[in-house]
Image (cartoon, rainbow, N blue to C red):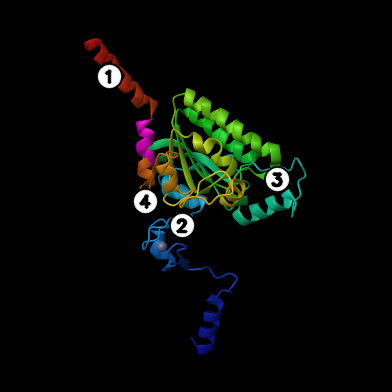
Amino acid sequence: MGFSEFFGNFRKKQSSPKEAPSHWVKCSKCQSLMYFKEIEHLFNVCPKCGFHMRITALERINLLADQDSFVEFDSSLAPIDPLKFVDKKSYKKRISEAIKNTGRTSAVISGGCSINGINTQLVVFDFKFMGGSLGSVEGEKIVRAISRAIKNEEGLVIVSASGGARMQESTFALLQMSKTSAALTKLSDAGLPFISVLTDPTMGGVSASFAWLGDIIITEPGSLIGFAGQRVIKQTIGADLPQGFQRAEFLLEHGLIDMIIQRNKMKDCISDMLIFFNKNCAKVDFQDDQELEMQA
Ligand SMILES: [Zn+2]
């Protein structure tokens, strides 16, 4: 191979700055610079300070579902624009841009999978799709996942990452809050568990509806969780907010969530919860209680 051929091949392998993937990741908490492979096997948790970086919906599914077990449902459901809404851009344009950027038609991926061998319905929010906002398609996909959980007698896990209800759908989006909450009542009546995992960030209409209705509410360290943004609250009440306000640790201390779990332990924690709240296990306990009563 001549020098010019070698140089030609070398040049071909170079990507333009626009195409070049970033192989270096900077921790936004401790500012450490790390090679992406270094943190990939740590589930994107900084090895220096333990900061949990945001991960994609697909990475989340890979983290929680057993290998090759996830089967997606309702992937073709796509939003319409009933209000012909236009702000800085039209809603139609925003949808088409989000579809182009993510390859998906909604901010929710839903399906069935097994988690450490336990069949479960799993719903994961994709924050990259319009800030994980809750619109009519997202609400419908959640309700369908709940219906499948009831039909199959399985538990439900929803991993939220959302800025709230989708303002471009107005009341259609707000209605999803009551629609999902009502469906969860049916899941509860069927004696099936709902594990709600709130990840960074979970805000607005999502935190104000189904996300807070979990039988167990789990978060990751440092996650931002709340309803209104801190600036709005500060302006409304006219006072400084306490340190750590709306962060997972603050919420745990004040009894709003049940536990904070490190990302590498999340899968085992969820499967333990699904076993603990499984209604068949509850029946065994109930029978034991009956026997004890009879013996007494
Ligand atoms: Zn760090």
Disc 3 element: helix
Q: Which residue is mark 3?
A: 168
- Residue type at numbered disc 1: Asp
Q: Residue furthest front?
A: 238
- Classed neighbour count for the residue bearing mark 1: other residues with Cα under 10 Å, few (<14), some (14–19), many (≥20): few
Asked if residue 210 is positioned above or below residue 280 in the image, the reply reads: below
Q: Which residue is mark 1?
A: 288
Q: Earlier in the sequence, mark 3 or mark 1?
A: 3
Q: Where is residue 212 drawn, in percent x and y?
A: 50, 37
Q: Which mark is residue 53?
A: 2
Q: Is residue 68 visible?
A: no
Q: Earlier in the sequence, mark 2 or mark 3?
A: 2
Name which residue lies at 22% across and 11% down.
Answer: 295
Name which residue lies at 68% across and 44% down.
Answer: 167
Q: Where is residue 125 drawn, in percent x and y?
A: 54, 46
Please give the range of residues in magenta.
270-277
Asked if residue 63 is positioned above or below residue 118 in the image, the reply reads: below
